[in-house]
Amino acid sequence: MEARIAQDPFAFKDENRSKSKVTIRLQVPEVLALFEQPERSQLLRFLAQMREAARLKKRTLLNFKNTQKLYPCGTLLFISELYRLIDYYDFGDYLIINYPDNDVVEQLFQHIGFLGKLGKKNRAVVTSDKVVHWKFLCGTNVDLSGVSTFHNDLITSLGFEGADRLVAGIGEAITNCMHHAYLEDRNDGIPISNRKAWWLFVAKKDDEIHVVICDLGIGIPRSLEVNNPWPAVLFRSTLSSLGMDRYHDSGYIETSLELGKTRTGQDNRGKGLPQIVDVVNQAKKGGLRIFSNRGFYNYNAINGKSSTREFGDSIFGTIIQWSFPISDYIKVVGDE
Amino acid sequence: MINVAEEFSPFPAGRYRSDGPYSGERFREEILVPKLATGNKLIINLIGTMGIGSSFLEEAFGGLVREKGFKPKVLKESLEIRSSLPTYQKEIWQYIEQA
């Protein structure tokens, strides 16, 4: 990955950083998404290159020149991966970035604090309707204090009860992540062990709420292999009845949802994901997507249909993305 | 009376102490159990809190039975839950009964 640098147009003039030359240049993909190919593979390949650059402690440029489209799943995974490397592996000491050419991309990265974290001045006026509604939170434990920055907005939009249930759902998703995601090493080549963390997007736009949460742990399949709340025989027979086996990460996701619908596992576990499906299901609109390692589960509440897909490459973690209309959500919450 | 939002956190969350600073386990051990030990009726005021999830509630209140040996019948007489959302009372008593 060594680059020839006769004249380096991206030489970063910052008195706080070394003026050493960039030796690794990484092109951030045009599209940050996980649900379709080839965009998923392009993003995951880029993330692997980024981890390798961090491991080698090489001066690295992330080039956003061609980055045009940001989907929540791919964008949150990228942000999570990079923040993990910066916060726990000192990658920030070796990293420079340029401003994206795409104005909306720059606005989003500025709006969530990403540019500032990487030492770039905020220069955009954040006005895009695709950006302003999104909030970004992250943490290393179950602490919802960050919600206080926007919980009044949630109450205005959803009413107190709606806002309360949504925040409770987010708290449960984070708790699940802390309990199950980091049971073993991630095995991604970076020796950061047992550093628990979560990253979250939430948005209220028009009549819809969107929540996306990411962990960079061992994924649902490995977590269930390590510590399954259901009896092994029951789990494997349910997996088999779905036409899957232990080589299907998507099967593990779907099986845990199936079992969670009808029974709780040991120690009251196993209820988190099915509860999220329940909210979406009762609203009869919106959807749920779960990405975990190579598996992908998609549920469409409008037609009640779910589908799974097995990809060839792993995200090394879990992303849960759910959305539902505000009006239906308030109705569902009010009926509980 | 315990005003949870003021005396503990407006956003209690998480099950175990290892989860975070405002967990159900911490609330139970540091606040609930000592107050119940006085033998007086205890009012738990949840007004002012937001987004309390099942992990917190089950560990805090179900844990009184499961971990500390309180009897549900005794808790029925000792505890009063106040909140702006009736769902919290329902959920807490369910965890106490099922623990």
Image (cartoon, coloured by chain):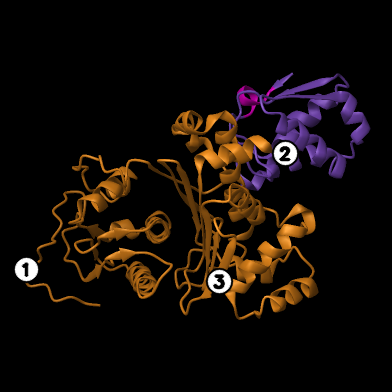
Comparing labels 2 and 3, the label whose residue is closer to the camera: 3
Q: What's the chain of the residue with tag 3?
A: A
Q: Could you say which disc has been placed on residue A308 in the image?
A: 3
**2 and 3 marks on the same chain:** no
Residue B58 appears left or right of A194: right
What hue does chain A carry in this figure? Answer: orange
Task: Quickly name the residue at label 1.
Answer: A7
Quadrant the N terminus of chain A occupies? bottom left
Measured as percent of width and height from the top left, residue A207 is found at 44, 41
Label 2 sits on a secondary structure element that is: helix
The answer to whether B88 is drawn above or below residue A62 in the figure is: above
Task: Quickly name the residue at label 2.
Answer: B57
Q: Quick one: label 3, few (<14), some, or many (20+) residues within 10 Å?
A: some
Q: Could you say which disc has been placed on residue A252 in the image?
A: none
Q: What's the chain of the residue with tag 2?
A: B
Comparing labels 2 and 1, the label whose residue is closer to the camera: 2
Residue A222 visible: no
Q: What's the chain of the residue with tag 1?
A: A
Q: Residue at x 61, y 67 (%)?
A: A253
